[in-house]
């Protein structure tokens, strides 16, 4: 990372350079506007701290000249000034500044700005590397991802597709469970046969059996003709049952019989029909809890989970957020730095589906060729100063505060690991680098279920 400090006072440059110096950073300096422009054009710094009030060529001159350059990539510019007026700030932003700080500045504040900028630079370079790399390294059919959880998922899909076992896909809503199911089918020996997808939660409860198993004419009011049902439509291929956790109890019993015997019985007849179908099911529900609550059959669960796949939530794989955003973004648009920061900070409760909808809406609302946070409805949260982070511990005795801080950190780290691995304790233990038994013991101590 390259940081340029522009100030006509040498002691000021020295003090800021000393505060910002760290491994992986190159500190550049300029004493006035013309020298600053030469440094920017020659070295392309990632972050510029620009003093506004300098003799001859001041900071506003630098901002205006950079606008005239029409560079495809401009640095993040933080204006440093004694003037903290709102109108002045607006003028700086209009001329291309990212933000401004006033003198005398807080050292930790400029360090936090540099850390945030460095994280953005790392992410941007990683995305550029991925975009220039062989597509096979990040694309897996219709799926996209470079994070470790997604690479592991791609490997498991390949292995599962080569078997004839049923597959249960677990993951939050919007993570792409149907896309995974389609990849399993496309890579299996049944790929030339039908793939039928059914959302059991979207069916009227009174019609679920008819939709799944079919019916004969006259079986119920409105049944004016025979209907095959999705099991027979998928014969020889794959049937994807989405939101299986919402299936009514009566249908669960009949589905279990189909899985055990390979036959379906249409509604309204005693006749049975033999079918050859591979079942892939999916749910965002906690089926183990549903079994305890007696709303899901345990024997059906074990029949469905021949192989169980977990799709990680988007918030647990930051590396993939910009990758997916650029995939959804129209070619004529780009994301501003602030939008990138907002995307990384956002928790994405709706996962990839929410990201795609956000991009689509932003593209429709964008007036220029750069998508801003205002177009997305997201905001960038500024970093909290270190002393505010530790306020809760300052009233405690030192030893007690230290123990409480460690406990809070361990609880947060464990909960994040569990969330990233869909509450799979073994996977979370591997992520944390500890034994499974140690993690279980620590979870018990911290009251984590």
Image (cartoon, helix red, strand yellow):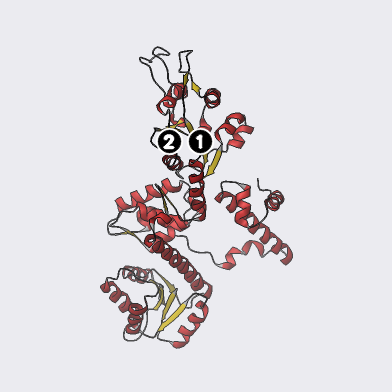
Find residue 341 and report its horizontal and vertical position in percent.
43, 61
Q: Which mark is residue 415?
A: none
The residue to which callout 2 is attached is: 190
Q: Is residue 300 above or below residue 335?
A: above
Residue 378 visible in rendering: no
Q: Helix, strand, or loop for circle 2?
A: loop
Q: Helix, strand, or loop for circle 1?
A: loop
- Density class for disc 2 (Cα within 10 Å; few <14, some 14-19, many ≥20) is some
Which quadrant would residue 86 be assigned to in this image? Answer: bottom left
* Label whose residue precedes the other's in the sequence (2 or 1): 1
- Density class for disc 1 (Cα within 10 Å; few <14, some 14-19, many ≥20) is some
In front of the other: 78 or 337: 337
Find residue 188 and report its horizontal and vertical position in percent.
45, 39
In front of the other: 343 or 271: 271
Find residue 119 and report its horizontal and vertical position in percent.
47, 66
Is the C-beta separation of discs 2 and 1 under 8 Å?
no
Find residue 379 and report its horizontal and vertical position in percent.
43, 57
The residue to which callout 1 is attached is: 164
Q: Residue at x 38, y 36 (%)?
A: 192
Q: Residue at x 58, y 65 (%)?
A: 388
CA separation, marks 2 and 1? 9 Å
Q: Residue at x 66, y 63 (%)?
A: 393
């Amino acid at each position: 990372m390259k940081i340029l400090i522009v100030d006509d006072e040498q002691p000021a440059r020295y003090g800021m350079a000393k505060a910002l110096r760290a491994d992986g950073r190159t500190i550049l300096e300029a004493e006035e506007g013309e020298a600053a422009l030469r440094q920017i054009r020659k070295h392309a710094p990632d972050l510029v701290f620009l003093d506004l009030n300098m003799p001859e060529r001041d900071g506003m001159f630098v901002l205006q000249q950079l606008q005239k350059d029409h560079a495809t990539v401009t640095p993040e510019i933080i204006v440093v000034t004694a003037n903290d007026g709102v109108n002045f700030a607006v003028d700086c932003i209009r001329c291309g500044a990212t933000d401004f700080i006033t003198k005398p500045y807080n050292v930790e504040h400029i360090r936090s700005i540099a850390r945030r900028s460095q994280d953005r630079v790392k992410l941007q370079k990683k995305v550029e590397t991925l975009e220039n790399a062989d597509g096979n390294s990040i694309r897996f059919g219709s799926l996209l991802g470079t994070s470790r959880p997604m690479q592991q998922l791609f490997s498991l899909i390949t292995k599962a597709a080569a078997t004839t076992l049923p597959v249960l896909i677990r993951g939050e809503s919007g993570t792409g469970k149907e896309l995974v199911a389609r990849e399993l089918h496309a890579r299996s020996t049944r790929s030339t046969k039908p793939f039928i997808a059914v959302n059991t939660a979207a069916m009227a409860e009174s019609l679920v059996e008819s939709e799944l198993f079919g019916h004969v004419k006259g079986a119920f009011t409105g049944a004016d003709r025979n209907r095959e049902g999705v099991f027979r439509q998928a014969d020889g291929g794959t049937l994807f049952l989405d939101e299986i956790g919402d299936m009514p109890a009566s249908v669960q019993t009949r589905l279990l019989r189909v899985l055990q015997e390979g036959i379906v019985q249409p509604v309204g007849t005693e006749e049975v029909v033999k079918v050859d179908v591979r079942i892939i099911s999916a749910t965002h529900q906690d089926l183990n809890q549903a079994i305890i609550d007696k709303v899901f059959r345990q024997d059906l669960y074990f029949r469905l989970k021949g192989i169980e796949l977990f799709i990680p939530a988007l918030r647990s794989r930051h590396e993939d957020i910009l990758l997916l955003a650029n995939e959804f973004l129209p070619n004529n648009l780009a994301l501003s730095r602030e939008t990138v920061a907002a995307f990384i900070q956002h928790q994405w409760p709706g996962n990839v589906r929410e990201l795609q909808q956000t991009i689509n809406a932003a593209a429709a609302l964008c007036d220029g060729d750069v998508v801003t946070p205002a177009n997305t409805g997201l905001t960038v949260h500024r970093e909290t100063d270190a002393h505010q982070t530790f306020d809760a511990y300052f009233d405690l005795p030192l030893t007690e505060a230290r123990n409480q801080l460690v406990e809070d950190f361990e609880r947060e780290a464990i909960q994040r690991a569990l969330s990233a691995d869909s509450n799979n304790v073994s996977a979370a233990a591997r992520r944390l680098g500890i034994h499974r038994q140690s993690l279980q013991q620590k979870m018990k101590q911290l009251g984590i279920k």
